[in-house]
Amino acid sequence: MNDTQKQVLAELSAILVREPVRTERLLLRPFRETDLPELFAYLSQAEQRRMSGNPKIETLEDARDVLQFFTDPSHPPYSFALELLSEQKVVGNVSIGCYPFLESDERMRALRGVSLSYVLNENYWRRGLMSEVLRELYAVLFEKGKLEYINSGYFAFNTASAALQQKLGMKPWMEHIVERDGEQIPTKEMLLWRADWEAGQQAAKR
């Protein structure tokens, strides 16, 4: 990650810390030490891991290592807890970053953009929670973060994630292979350009 990308991520992190994204049902906020049991609860789920490609988490100490990374004071928070307000419970997380393939693409490297990844406790799938928070997050990133694009990807077999990203206006960009546990997994990357997002916002107002 080059210095420009680090600066962009630091600026976005500061915005999200200062003004946490809130929807009718959800709050996107920095992680706290007290979130450990709930973080472990969803990171240890086998199906969630298969869909997201996250490292295997088997013990509370494994999850503690992840939480320590999320809350490391030596850098701004890049992963934010997704709290379900009605239960006051963390049910997932959304992370901002810059994937290596973006860094190696000269055209994309010259633009102000970010990659988003997200994880949701599988007990809360199919409730529209992730689309709800991502819509609000996109608005913050494009309007206050002044981004030119947002990238997200999914394993080719993850039809739910594909449908979610398409629903949010993302369009196919590239395909590549990701290795997980010795398996070669076809992966599809999507992009939402600022102009397309703005057009969608205008159409929704009509």
Image: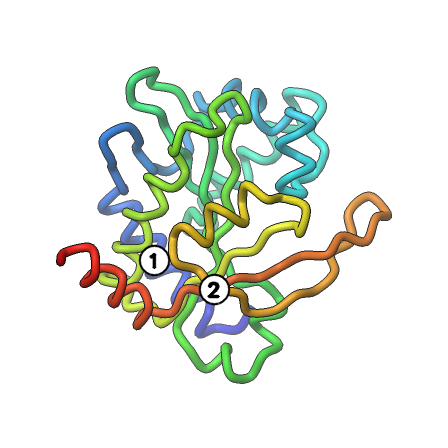
Identify the residue at the far left of this view. Answer: 206
The amino acid type, in three-letter code, at marker 2 is Lys
Which sits in the foreground, 74 or 164?
164
**Farthest-out residue, right:** 182
> Disc 2 versus disc 1: distance between alpha carbons?
23 Å
Please state which amino acid type lies under the numbered disc 1. Answer: Leu
Left or right side of 131 for 125: right
Disc 2 secondary structure class: strand
In the depicted structure, whether residue 18 falls above or below residue 81: below
Any mark on residue 49, and which?
none
Q: Nearer the viewer, mark 2 or mark 1?
A: 2
- Residue placed at 55% from the left, 69% from the top? 173
Q: Where is residue 91 in the image (x, y as percent from the top left)?
A: 45, 26
User: Dot 2: within a 10 Å radius of its alpha carbon, few (fewer than 14), some, or many (20 or more) residues?
Assistant: some
Instruction: Say which of 65 and 128 sits in front.
Output: 128
- What residue sits 52% from the left and 62% below the top? 190
Q: Tell me where residue 99 appears, x and y as whole percent.
A: 58, 62
Q: Which mark is residue 171?
A: 2
| Residue at image mark 1 | 12
